[in-house]
Image: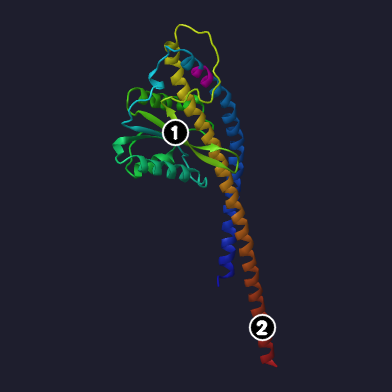
Amino acid sequence: MASLRDIQNRINSTKKTSQITKAMQMVSAAKLNRAETNAKSFVPYMEKIQEVAASIALGSKDATHPMLVSRPVKKTGYLVITADRGLAGPYNSSILRAVNAKIQQRHKSKDEYAIIAIGRMGRDFFIKRGMNVVLDITGLPDQPSFVDIMDITRNTVGMFSDGTFDELYMYYNHFVSALTQEVTEKKVLPLTDLGTSTKLMSYEYEPSPEAILEVLLPQYAESLIYGALLDGKASEHAARMTAMKSATDNASELIDSLTLSFNRARQAAITQEITEIVGGAAALE
């Protein structure tokens, strides 16, 4: 049986750990509120730019653009959004497991796919396994602005345009609630389903549909990536808050269990001392 000192040391160390996890839970909760607001406030812009792009692309018979056309798939791109840090429960592992399974199912060689990794956890996972990472970004702030990811979004869209890959899928955790996040696969390029869930409107524009789509469609694709990143950040903070709450609760239960063991051990020690005193006194009579 552990000594009283050993039990007391475990109680003290568990209390310190509990204080850390409690602080991390509160920090993540504060970050979650802002991240959720950012993600929801970006939705109207993304819906509007989709409406405008779909209305121009589908409303004109003469409008054409390479991003609207499916082509023979020689290489598939995967944009994977993870976190830079762990301690977020299954947030990172669920995404990486889904992407890895899909790649193993679809492709026989790493020449058939290219990975764009946002987040250190994803980048390290793929590089460690020798998978084809062509672009990565780490160190993004907890509340990223579009400027922070402008380069990677433009490079990603540019890779599709120059033929580095012929289609692009995006994987991220969709924020449902503070307790629920869903791994989501979304096809970003080509924009073949642009108008499936959008009400087409009539716009007056100039100079031509092609000239407008040349600017608008890359911006729309970039907005999809940025919107997913905001969604993923909200999910990350929610997952970390939940994980730290669970850790704090487990620490409290462990402290209660150790305290009970400590009291029992102390009671046994006191009883033993009383027995020895009584025995000694009886021997002197």
Q: Is residue 212 magenta?
A: no
Q: Earlier in the sequence, mark 2 or mark 1?
A: 1
Q: Is residue 120 above or below residue 202?
A: below
* Magenta stretch bounds: 49-54
> Which residue type does callout 1 highlight?
Met
* Residue matched to label 2: 275
Give the quarter of the figure containing the N terminus: bottom right
Residue 76 versus residue 155: which sits nearer the camera? 76
Task: Relative to 43, say whether 8 is above or below.
Answer: below
Which residue is located at x 67 percent, y 78 percent? 271
The image shows residue 49 at horizontal and vertical percentages of 52, 20
Residue 135 in sight here: no
Give residue 237's position: percent from left, percent from top: 56, 39
Q: Nearer the viewer, residue 155 or 255?
A: 155
Q: Position of residue 285 (x, y in %)?
A: 70, 93
Picture disc at residue 170: 1
- Residue displayed at 50% across by 32% down: 229
The residue lying toward the viewer, choosing from 106 and 117, is 106
Does dot 1 land on a helix, a strand or a loop?
Answer: strand
Residue 173 lies, in percent from the top left, at 51, 38
What separation in Å lies between label 2 and label 1 (alpha carbons)?
72 Å
